[in-house]
């Protein structure tokens, strides 16, 4: 005899059938808790200001790209701050030496500072650029309404190259000024040895050391070549990326594919990094004066070269350091390690720009998507 509290097999089958029928004819069925949480989180993000959502997308994009190329970046920095000649074929040997001496974590030495820096850096950069871009597009939309009302044709497509350059340069300078101390700390951590079974100097220790030795100015040592470099660097990168995507959209009349976005990002990064590379070498040299030639650094792993940076009483001016590098190694010294940038730069930029576009698409409202598509539709 079947207990009244426990349904029979036939009753269970009937319940399942009724549930399926209810789903078919539109009765509401409770969603799984996981999906509800996901939708609630997405709905909450969508209520945030547009600028903050762009900041979030940019931060995620920057962290993703930088994490993937961090080992190459560390080796490049070691060469930049030393007098050792660079040979691309030596890079695997240097990587193996770091692995033996410091372990796998050694290849990502300083990456914590990079992650802390790159999230606000990339977030601010993409947020400011998109804000400038939106301002220009709205201005063009208003102009086109007047032109249409007067029987004149619309002006054309998207941002002009000059507007892209201005937007990129403004974005670059804002992000650098707000996050520069973290960039300097990352560079110094990349040069220092990661001692096993010993207490290593961390991010807070680096900040304290620079502040105690030079005050507030010590946290911004090397800012001059950084500003001189970021203006053309960010301007060129964003201009080429934006104009390339607009060109593809205008020619094909469709959205740019993921592969095309990666190609646009790769090419823009390649040109931007190469054109401003001497200023990057100069910045790294200035940031590590008094550190790169110390006994606690890993620069000696490269070979017989050294970073004799104390000539001139620790002079840190941009022109002095560039002259010193040129005197030591010629014009090649100012481009030392640029071939590594040709390998990792396009990869990093393509990942960064593509990730930003993808995340931005996930957290954009319909009206924002229409605004971005304005350049194509007209």
Image (tube, rainbow, N blue to C red):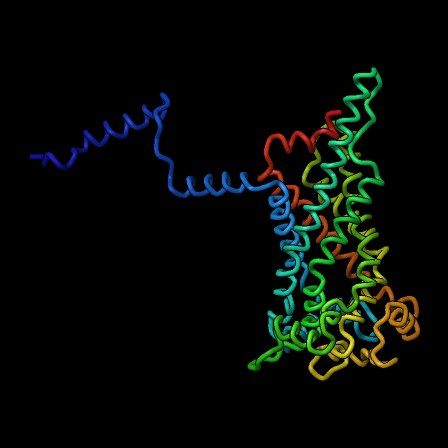
Q: Quadrant of the C terminus?
A: top right
Residue 341, horizontal then vertical, whole percent: 78, 59
Residue furthest out toward the left: 1
Determine whether, in the image, residue 27 is placed left or right of residue 192. Answer: left
Q: Quadrant of the N terminus?
A: top left
Q: Is residue 306 above or below residue 57?
A: below
Residue 17, horizontal then vertical, whole percent: 28, 26
Residue in the picture at 59% in, 34% down: 365
Residue 165, horizontal then vertical, whole percent: 82, 44
Residue 92 in view: no
Image-quadrant location for residue 360: top right
Residue in the picture at 64% in, 65% down: 113
Residue in the picture at 81% in, 68% down: 87
Determine whether, in the image, residue 163 is placed left or right of residue 191. Answer: right
User: Depth check: 376 or 13 in front?
Assistant: 376
Q: Is residue 307 above or below residue 60?
A: below
Residue 261, horizontal then vertical, whole percent: 71, 41
User: Depth check: 266 or 220 in front?
Assistant: 220
Q: Is residue 304 above or below residue 261?
A: below
Image-quadrant location for residue 117: bottom right
Residue furthest out toward the front: 215
């Amino acid at each position: 005899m079947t207990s009244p509290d426990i349904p029979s097999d036939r009753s269970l089958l009937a319940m399942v059938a009724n549930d399926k029928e209810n789903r078919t004819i539109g009765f509401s069925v409770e969603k799984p808790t996981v999906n509800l949480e996901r939708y609630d989180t997405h709905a909450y993000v969508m209520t945030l200001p547009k600028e903050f959502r762009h900041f979030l997308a940019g931060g995620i994009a920057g962290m993703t790209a930088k994490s993937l190329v961090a080992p190459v970046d560390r080796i490049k920095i070691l060469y930049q701050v030393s007098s050792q000649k660079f040979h691309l074929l030596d890079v695997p040997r240097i990587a193996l030496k770091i692995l033996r001496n410091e372990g796998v974590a050694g290849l990502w030495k300083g990456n914590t500072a990079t992650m802390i820096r790159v999230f606000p850096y990339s977030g601010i950069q993409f947020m400011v650029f998109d804000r400038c871009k939106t301002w220009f597009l709205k201005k063009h939309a208003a102009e086109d309404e007047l032109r249409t009302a007067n029987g004149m044709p619309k002006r054309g497509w998207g941002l002009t190259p000059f507007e892209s350059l201005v937007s990129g340069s403004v974005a670059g300078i804002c992000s650098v000024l707000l996050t520069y101390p973290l960039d300097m700390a990352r560079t110094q951590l990349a040069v220092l040895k990661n001692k096993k079974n010993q207490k290593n100097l961390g991010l807070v220790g680096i900040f304290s050391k620079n502040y105690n030795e030079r005050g507030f100015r010590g946290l911004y040592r090397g800012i001059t070549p950084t500003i001189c470099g970021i203006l053309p660097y960010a301007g060129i990168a964003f201009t080429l990326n934006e104009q390339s995507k607009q060109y593809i959209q205008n020619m094909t009349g469709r959205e740019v594919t993921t592969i095309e976005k990666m190609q646009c990002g790769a090419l823009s990064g390649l040109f931007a990094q190469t054109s401003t590379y001497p200023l990057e070498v100069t910045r790294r040299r200035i940031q590590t004066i008094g550190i790169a030639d110390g006994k606690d650094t890993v620069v000696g792993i490269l070979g017989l070269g050294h970073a004799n940076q104390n000539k001139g009483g620790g002079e840190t001016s941009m022109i002095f350091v560039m002259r010193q590098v040129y005197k030591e190694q010629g014009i090649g010294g100012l481009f030392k390690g640029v071939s590594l940038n040709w390998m990792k730069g396009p990869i990093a930029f393509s990942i960064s720009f593509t990730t930003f576009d993808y995340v931005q698409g996930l957290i954009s409202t319909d009206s924002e998507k229409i605004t971005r598509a304005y350049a194509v539709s007209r």
